[in-house]
Amino acid sequence: MESTQRTIQLLLKPGQHDGEGQRVAEAASRHLGLSTGRVQSTALYTVRYPVTDQQLRDFATHCLQDPVLHDVALDEFRHGADYKSYILVAKLPGVTDDEGISAQNALGDFLNEPLDTHTQHIFSKRLYFLEHELPESSLRQLAQDLLGNKMINRFEVGPIAQIRDYTPRPGGGAESITDTVRLVGLSDEELVKLSKDNLYALNLEEMRVVRDHYTSIQAERQAAGLSQDPTDCELEIIAQTWSEHCKHKEFSALIKYRDADTGEEFEVDSLFKTYIKDATAEVDRQLRANGNDWLIKVFSDNAGAVRINPKSLFVWKVETHNSPSAIDPYGGAITGILGNNRDPLATGIGGARLLFNTNVLCFGNPEFNGTLLSNQLHPRRIFEGVRKGIEDGGNKSGVPTVNGSIVFDDRYAGKPLVYCGTGAVMPMQLAGLDSWEKKIDPQDRIIMAGGRVGKDGIHGATFSSIELDETSPATAVQIGSPITQKLAMDFLLLATRRGLIKCSTDNGAGGLSSSIGELATISGGAVVELERVPLKYPGLRPWEIFVSESQERFSLAVEPAKLDELLALGREMEVELTDIGYFTADGYLDVRFAGEPVAHLDMHFLHDGVPRKVLEAEWSKPTAQEPALAPATDYTDALTRLLGSLNICSRESVIRQYDHEVKGRTIIKPLMGATGQAPQDAAVVRFNFESWEGVAVSNGILPRFGDLDAYHMSAGAFDEAVRQIVAVGGKLPNLSYGDGNFWSVNDNFCVPDSVYDPATNPDGKHKLAKLVRMCQALRDATAAYCIPLTSGKDSMKNDFKADGVKISVPPTVLYSMTAKIEDVRRTVTSDFKQADDVVYLLGETYDELGGSEFYQLFGELGANVPKVRFERAKALYTLMGQANDQGLIQSCHDVSDGGLAVALAEATFGYGFGANIELPLPHPPAPSPGGEGEPGAPLINGQLPVHVQLFSESHSRFVATVAPEDVPAFEQHFGSRATRLGWVTPDGQLTVRQAGKTVIQASTAALRHEWTNGPVNRIIGFGQHEAAQ
């Protein structure tokens, strides 16, 4: 055998385009001002296993090389001529190396030899060569800022003549050091300092409660041989369990609300209970009263569950990963999507089969050219890193990304919002048991499955509960490994179906502390032996092991009699399983290291001892007025500019990076039509290949309307998500007996710090009042549509503070909505289908340009915020469902950003058709009583000026087309709710007239060009030629 450390290098053949190298060069110039010249990117594998020269060459060429693209170099660092500098990017010890592990598995298969899966033999790296000679400091900056993460990667840089390789060495075990923390007798000032210094994220009142608790149990601790003061592990567990991220203290608070305009005052006894839990309970009551019992599990597990049919459940969860994504965009996003995948996977017994992913992203302006604050990343870098993380998290796990949205606002420049969603399917029963139930008995074993534990993610839960600043820790960001998680997913699917697992939960925020702490509430206690926990590298202390949020891990409850069979299955499927303790019923969480106690916590105090917050909210309506626009506005120009604007332009460059086809079940994709560029309102995914049942997936998010009224912003976002599903063929719950068409909604609230403080947060009362109004709208919307909430999340401290400047996100709520589609073959897409089809506007347009994209063109906000008229909307949506059943609708597109004009333009993009549109003539309003809280009947449709008809963003509207032969039936069905606008033309021209006067005249190809070549596609590097195809 030859030397036991060898290298394999893969480099592109001469003449092959090096896209990665080009992106590195461009990013170095754009973000860092570095001139690298040409950059050559290569893949490097270090093999630490005895192989012959021939075996190494054969393995490289047969298992690693793409013979069309790559040349292979063995035991050398080959590069093109005229390169002066190099950067090597390797993994630090303990960081999961997916590519290296996959190559190692391939080597074992190639040699037909079993390789020890707990010892790494192949290590993957990236090796870059730069044309220009750069100083080491510049090379290291480029490496750390653009090519890797110093918490994850080791970098070697320098002149090309001094290339150094680096390969991590295996480590050992943990450090058995547990400290006590002086708490009893501390003053208020000392308590506050202790919390801040240790990132406990507990306020003074909470720290007092902890101190007083330990003061009251001195005798008990002495009898148990414990110190009078808490251990570091105990305080970390309490901080994690009581964190805002895990405990939702502000959504559970008692809120004293006052309307400064009207003088009205009332108390809210928990936002969650009053506006979410109770609202869903009322919807469920109405559904069950009519024999509709498809709502199975809400709010009490990792994800909500609804019944698809007698055999299957649909499981749905959406969460955020905001704070980590602000520090490490790629790492934050990939762990966001992978972590969210684990929620449906570990609902009930566990083992759901993942069906799809979604993502909704909120960023600052990626073209920002001002000065960044200390520790603030440029919005463009955050955008690019998050997008890549979402791509890798979904694509490498084999889960399609089918729906999403991207919102830009300068107020997201400090802390982005990264919403990740996952839908899954689970059998109604697993091994004869109800799959959605969690049951644990004393003496059941605690098994940790999946990845190993490292320092990544320590303090993730508490860190996410406070605002970001210059001192925010990089170790709070987790490191994701899609391949490790995929193995664990496959293992769970098989183990649950064999009846080997009693129940499961994921190791997300708070790691073992959270997962075991929560599962222990079912049995009444737990004993954990931390020295058994497998580590990525040596040096972790017991408290770090317990609260680390290292990814790809599950905690399983297993009957002792089934343990051996489970462990054998883990070995067979190459998933690491470790028995780390057992459940009890003694009321304590007992954590030990090598037999010594490191935490002994009363379960009641741990989960119910946090003091309840009492908060103040005060609402006053903002002062706003409608702008006076020049009468000579060029509406063709306005439409063109809107289509190229940041919040409306095409996202194709992002969408094309995601695999939305994997699994082969995606019926309505993000972009459709012959051009593949017609944007769709909702995705539709088939559940399986045995039936035509499927699920529609949509999202609603409208933060800009919150600047005028947070109630109408929230109501509008909910309605947007509903009407997107209605547009593709979904039907509202109609309360008819036995209607099995489920709806399942996740609400995700992301707001700035809303706790009033006269010095540090003087507008806290107003921000909290906005949140109250957002929740009130949610309650009203669920009641109006009889649509239940099944799960959700709140993120309460979305602020970034540095250099004396505070950037706070606008109060934002995302509604992620799913609904059963009985037959996916009956769904409808947004694009015009054939010439001569008749074009209709369904629903009413009101004078509601406040917060619109049209006003944004002129730097205006306006005053007339769009409002949802729930009863009229519900009646229209019911008519829509009936019309789809009758096959009357050829195409349907919801009217939203940019109003009617943008919706018409987008509907032409799929096949290149045009449209001849005639707006209703202005006429005085007919006298009628006021409605829905308005003093008089609002002006609608033809009663409105041209610019309002074109660009108002009134809710609950659609552009629909109808085949000529179906027009009589269609118009009879919809009556006054349908306004005939014109017809589809074959000439590729969008012409809009009123009273014979042309107000918009444009080539639809030119409009599509403007849309596809907008800033988002330019930023991601989607070239004009490519975008125009």
Image (cartoon, rainbow, N blue to C red):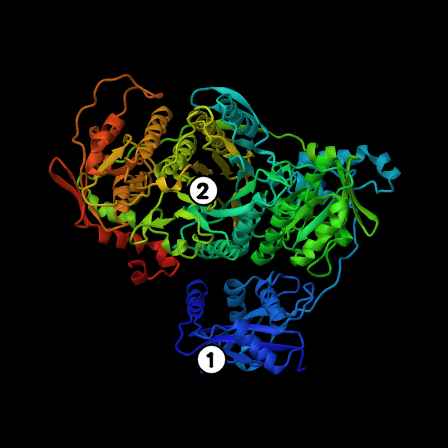
Q: Earlier in the sequence, mark 1 or mark 2?
A: 1
Residue 1029 point in image, percent of width and height: 29, 59
> Which residue: 43% across, 30% down?
711
> Which residue: 50% across, 24% down?
291
Query: Can the viewer see residue 453?
Result: no
Which one is closest to the eye, mark 1 or mark 2? 2
Residue 222 point in image, percent of width and height: 87, 39
Farthest residue in the front direction?
A: 690
- Label of residue 639 in the image: none
Alpha carbons under labels 1 and 2: distance apart = 58 Å
**Residue 207 in the figure: left or right of residue 759:** right
Q: Is residue 629 above or below residue 528?
A: above
Q: Residues within 10 Å of mark 2 (few under 14, many from 20)?
A: few
**Residue 117 in the figure: left or right of residue 584:** left
Location of mark 1 (residue): 83
Q: Nearer the viewer, residue 287 or 794?
A: 287
Q: Nearer the viewer, residue 134 or 789?
A: 789
Circle count:
2
**Which quarter of the picture shows residue 514?**
top right
**Which quarter of the picture shows residue 486?**
bottom right
**Residue 87 in the figure: left or right of residue 509:** left
Location of mark 2 (residue): 691
Q: Is residue 86 above or below residue 488?
A: below
Residue 128 point in image, percent of width and height: 50, 73
Does the CB distance between marks 1 and 2 fall below 8 Å?
A: no
Farthest residue in the top direction?
A: 929
Q: Amino acid at mark 1?
A: Tyr
**Residue 828 in the figure: left or right of residue 456:** left
| Placement of the N terminus among the 4 image quadrants | bottom right
**Label 2: which secondary element:** loop
**Label 1: which secondary element:** loop
Q: Amino acid at mark 2?
A: Ser
